[in-house]
Amino acid sequence: MIFLAKARFLSLFLVFHYVVEFCIGGDVITASEYIQDPGSITSSGGLYRMGFFSPNGSANRYVGIWYNNVPRYSVLWVANRKNPILDSSGVMTISGDGNLVVMNGKRELVWSSNVSNSVTNAKAQLLDSGNLVLLKQSSNSSANDAENLWESFQHMTDSFLEKMKLSTNSRTNEKQALTSWKSPSDPSIGSFSASLDPRNIPELFIWNGSSLYWRSGPWNGNIFTGVPEMQSVYSNGFAEASYMSYLLLKSNGDLVQPYWDQSSSSWGIVWSSRLSDCDVYGQCGPFGICNAKKSPICSCLKGFEPKNFEEWSRGNWSSGCIRKSLLQCNGTTNGSSTAGKKDGFLKLEIMKVPSSGIFFSTLEEDCPGNCSMNCSCVAYAYDSGVGCVFWIGELIDLQKFSIGGTTLYVRLAHSELEKKGHLREIIATTVIIGTLVVIIIIWFARRKAKKQAVKQSMEKHLSSGEAPSVVMLGENLSRVEFQEFVKYKIEELAAATGNFCEANKLGRGGFGPVYKGRLPNGQEIAIKRLSRASGQGQQEFMNEMEVICKVQHRNLVRLLGCCAEGDEKMLIYEFMPNKSLDTFIFDPLKQVHLDWRTRFNIVDGICRGLLYLHRDSRLRIIHRDLKASNILLDKELNPKISDFGMARIFGGNENQANTRRVVGTYGYMAPEYAMEGRFSEKSDVFSFGILLLEIVSGRRNTSFHYEDQCLSLLGLAWKLWNEEDVLALVDPTMPATPFEVQLSRCINVGLLCTQERAKDRPSISTVISMINSEIVDLPRPKQPAFTARKITQDTDSSGQSQKTCSANDVTLTVLQGR
Ligand SMILES: *[C@@H]1O[C@H](CO)[C@@H](O)[C@H](O)[C@H]1NC(C)=O
Ligand SMILES: *[C@@H]1O[C@H](CO)[C@@H](O)[C@H](O)[C@H]1NC(C)=O
Ligand SMILES: *[C@@H]1O[C@H](CO)[C@@H](O)[C@H](O)[C@H]1NC(C)=O
Ligand SMILES: *[C@@H]1O[C@H](CO)[C@@H](O)[C@H](O)[C@H]1NC(C)=O
Ligand SMILES: *[C@@H]1O[C@H](CO)[C@@H](O)[C@H](O)[C@H]1NC(C)=O
Ligand SMILES: *[C@@H]1O[C@H](CO)[C@@H](O)[C@H](O)[C@H]1NC(C)=O
Ligand SMILES: *[C@@H]1O[C@H](CO)[C@@H](O)[C@H](O)[C@H]1NC(C)=O
Ligand SMILES: *[C@@H]1O[C@H](CO)[C@@H](O)[C@H](O)[C@H]1NC(C)=O
Ligand SMILES: *[C@@H]1O[C@H](CO)[C@@H](O)[C@H](O)[C@H]1NC(C)=O
């Protein structure tokens, strides 16, 4: 009997293989080309397969998608997860109304894509991204505009693939979520779900039903601050050759990242949301702090004691801790004559910050003052990517990490702060973390494409004396979308701009005209209509824009979305009412209102935006066309750099240090870039140096007459430097200022930034330290670039000789032969 059953199983197995072999090749399902259990289809590149399967430990049949070439499959998506087919009679096909459906042997509907606008001619296709799409089949052979009626990426189950997007629409609160299986043998919807919460500060949450189970900590634009192992290297933001790794929300509530290890032919785990019990939300109750390396793991914050000593000693920490001494606020509010001194703040380093922080300001300096002023503020923290955040009420889900984390300041009564506590904790790396690091590094070392990036990052960190960063989540999580990237239709944009009428034209940038527009909801936008020069295809362009869309900083103009239809490519930006910096600093009427404080704030902001582009953003962008007209000003005259990333579209590969196509503006271009097409962070520093001198002097860096000499601004600055009269460069219309020392510092820095040789120029982070006087002794500049030669009168391309010394502020797009 048993023997018989085994034999039958074996023959079934053979049939299975037989059929599967037969089906390889097709990646579409139509009404006539359907899948019948146990058949399957394979994506065209052979990476993914879709067909019928039974989960481990169950005989039920489901339609799923899994990695094709992996013998022990892990299912990435399930269609009929709620309705299994009990025998092997299932069929997946296109129904009469154009929906993708799964039916059982009695032709009863088990699952449907359930798209309402019916189409008669539809087909489903399994793409090489792992996405299953339902397409309106176009009779047009050039059918690259086939419309997606439905896609599995929009209806994810428990797995998150690299190209997916987990998004929450903050307006409609419509969420995409991963939902766990009920158990490893039952794909129906379990109790855990994972979604992004974009309210206040974006964060990834895992819910058990309606109660919070795990939180990632706030997203700082680069990593989730509560996942300290997740440090991104400077990658160019693109997926390299596909490798099998994804995120999986397991039925026990753990979010893990499995990957296929080719050498051992098995699945490994790169990362797990639960490394210790500390990762369970609220483990130690209010004001409790969890440290996985201590025993017991929970303790009370300094100045606090267990609310219920008895329960606490039994290891029931849920009730948390209470203050030993009441807060006095600023020492006067509680009135009592014995009331103590003003409250202070306890500094806790390397922390996972508590949940429910309130974003307050982007400025670090606003943080301590405002928190201590507001008596209900019990803690604050600052992270350059998140900003200044504070907490009111109870502090829940605090954790002490051994690497990364954030510095948290907790309000304590003055009397508690004075007491000496055993506060210092030794930071030791545990075996767990150590092993993880090794695994990850090995894993990445295997990935050829990544190798270089990791190496660079390490060198960078080693040279700056920091520990090497560790890549943990790969690109999966860092690709999480927080801001909706909107793909606009050309009709919408035409309507918003009055059909791109001349009256709505804001100006003409280097890459095409810019229009002002107003969306139906009243939002004002700026639309850059790209000239046709971009050689990119639509999809490539969209991918690029989506990546650039994630580069966000308060000193960068925000890209809201884009549009690519036919030949047209447009970028949609937030609208800046105060236009660009050149309309201020070079305008005799407006420049009077720009006092030095405002100008310095602009200089500082530009530096910070540039630092973010060069160092902190995931893309490591070199701007290549920094100039006054590319600095926009918001209502408060805060600077925002625009047009960053354009070189990626127009100039090709950012990592390539040589380019055939030079994109830049005369007068701002570093010599090595203008002449040899070599660009680097230092060529941006050069442009910044010119900009800095322009802001100080209120003059363009085009040549002008000065005491009968034909000099560029840079030439003049160098002349005055040698005459030890740099303050003569300062804009005479600028209201008098007591900041002469700072002004001469800035001119000195401007000259350092414009040195002939790139290696003599400081990096932008050094520039920040220099202008903020953190570096006290500035080096003396050598002769800057372009000042040795005497400027002759310009000859423009048409051969006309101009009488003045001026050069036009035009963007050059020089194709340089090599
Ligand atoms: C299936 O389940 C058994 C027992 O539960 C387990 O030993 C085996 O590894 C599982 N197989 C797969 C492919 O997960
Ligand atoms: C299909 O969609 C309609 C609305 O569009 C909804 O009312 C219905 O419940 C859906 N059916 C299934 C099986 O999801
Ligand atoms: C096919 O598509 C092209 C461009 O997408 C269009 O110009 C043409 O009119 C279409 N033909 C038909 C028959 O729809
Ligand atoms: C999830 O919630 C259910 C019901 O509230 C509970 O029984 C279960 O223990 C929770 N699971 C975990 C892992 O906390
Ligand atoms: C833990 O303590 C709380 C109150 O402090 C109590 O309500 C709860 O029942 C306790 N849980 C267990 C498992 O003892
Ligand atoms: C003032 O003292 C009362 C108790 O005396 C306390 O409840 C209250 O929280 C204190 N106010 C502040 C701001 O700490
Ligand atoms: C104390 O705080 C209150 C408001 O909470 C404020 O009005 C008062 O000016 C503060 N006093 C001092 C000395 O800071
Ligand atoms: C509080 O924040 C505001 C900006 O929101 C800032 O102008 C002010 O200086 C801050 N106050 C203190 C005491 O830091
Ligand atoms: C303190 O901050 C809370 C939360 O933002 C706010 O509601 C409250 O008005 C603030 N209180 C004062 C005195 O500013």
Image: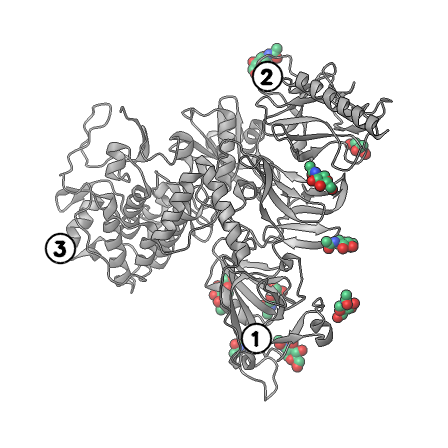
Q: Residues at badges 1 and 3 in contact (C-beta under 8 Å)?
A: no
Residue pictured at 78% horizontal, 26% vertical? 9
In-image side of 150 versus 291 (left or right):
right
Q: Where is residue 244? Give x, y as percent.
A: 57, 35
Q: Earlier in the sequence, mark 1 or mark 3?
A: 1
In-image side of 634 versus 689 (left or right):
right
Q: Secondary structure at mark 2?
A: loop
In-image side of 238 versus 452 (left or right):
right
Q: Where is residue 330? Give x, y as percent.
A: 55, 77
Residue pictured at 24% horizontal, 33% vertical? 675
Q: Earlier in the sequence, mark 1 or mark 2?
A: 2
**Is residue 326 shown above or below 631?**
below
Q: Is residue 571 visible?
A: no
Ligand 6 neighbours mark 1 (CB distance < 8 Å): no
Q: Quadrant of residue 734?
A: bottom left
Q: Secondary structure at mark 3?
A: loop
Q: Where is residue 7? Give x, y as percent.
A: 79, 24
Q: Which mark is residue 723?
A: 3
Q: Nearer the viewer, mark 3 or mark 2?
A: 2
Q: Where is residue 347? Give x, y as percent.
A: 51, 69
Q: Earlier in the sequence, mark 3 or mark 2?
A: 2
What is the crowding at mark 2: few (fewer than 14 residues within 10 Å), some, or many (at least 20)? few
Q: Quadrant of the N terminus?
A: top right
Q: CA distance from mark 3 to mark 2?
A: 69 Å
Q: Which mark is residue 460?
A: none
What is the crowding at mark 1: few (fewer than 14 residues within 10 Å), some, or many (at least 20)? many
Query: Pointer 2: what residue?
Result: 143
Q: 741 or 447, which lies in front?
A: 447
